[in-house]
Image (cartoon, rainbow, N blue to C red):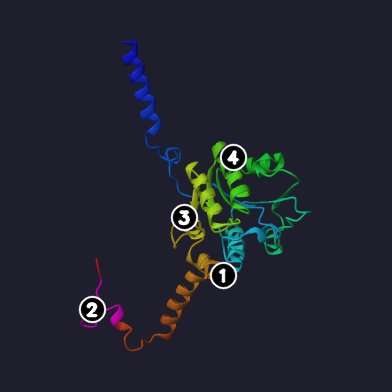
Amino acid sequence: MKFLSLIFLTFTALTAATAPVDPLAHAKKVPWERLDKDKALLLVLDLQVGLFQLVRDFDPTLYYRNLLAHAAIGKAFDIPVILTSSAQQGPNGPLPKEILEMYPNATLIQRNGQVSAWDNEEFKAAIKATGRTQIIVGGIVTDVCTAFLALALREEGYSVWANVEASGTTSQLIRDVSNDQMRYAGVNVVSMFYIICDLMKNWNNTPGAATILPWLDQYYPVYGQLARGHAAAIENGTEIPGEIGLISGPDGNLELVN
């Protein structure tokens, strides 16, 4: 009888050891929620001019636009912004002047030694003082600055959105591993356009089209050009041969689908 029990326990242990593990098991326990501009807080995390040179997973011109766009989200929706830098007197350098000029009165916490921003008591207190529960973050580098803070915030019970376009690191491999690590912990790893659209929710809201279209034209030009093309077509009011057929039926009339 003892022998059979031993066989059963061994079989159970082997089955448990070889059973497939769902890497998103923890993330699935985190309920999905919408961003709310009245609950959101934007963090500009170590987007410093020295650290910028470590970013090798993006075209540098594109990435510089991305980090400025990330910072400007606060302007678009009038949400609180906290800036922080790490050892900026050394090789990490200061935050870009464009970001500092956006927020001359924002809280700027210069950390002197703490790798994870959450280990800095002043920074931690500044976040808690806002009363905001939804944290939007982008930082350099993804695997340390962004991931360390995002995971710490999740552990504290905050909802976290990591702007995948605003965080950069030394390789695509490291970026992918780091984003997976955050995702498994329930961090929302999303694009800038996702963040903008979820904060806005409706082009008729305030802020809506009148505010967000010029913002997109500056920071997300692919949509800005879409809007420019539409405006030009309306203003011009003419078509060239072949165009009408692209949007009409065989008889030349527009077909509206209910």
In whole angstroms, how far apart are the C-alphas of marks 1 and 3?
Answer: 19 Å
Q: Which residue is mark 1?
A: 218
Per the rendering, the mark at residue 152 is 4
Classify the position of the C terminus by image quarter. Answer: bottom left
Mark 1 residue crowding within 10 angstroms, few (<14) / some (14–19) / many (20+)? some
Q: In this picture, is 39 found above or below 4?
A: below
Per the rendering, the mark at residue 249 is 2
In whole angstroms, how far apart are the C-alphas of marks 4 and 1?
Answer: 33 Å
In whole angstroms, how far apart are the C-alphas of marks 2 and 3?
Answer: 35 Å
Which dot, 4 or 3, sits closer to the camera? Answer: 4
What type is the residue that disc 4 sits on? Ala
Query: Dot 2: what SS?
Result: loop
Question: Where does residue 185 sit, x and y in percent of width and height?
Answer: 50, 41
Are circles 1 and 3 on residues that touch, CB within 8 Å?
no
Query: Dot 4: what SS?
Result: helix
Q: Which residue is mark 3?
A: 198
Question: What is the span of residues highlighted in magenta in the rendered image?
Answer: 245-256
What residue is shown at x 45% (from left), y 40% (from top)?
A: 30
Which dot, 4 or 1, sits closer to the camera? Answer: 4
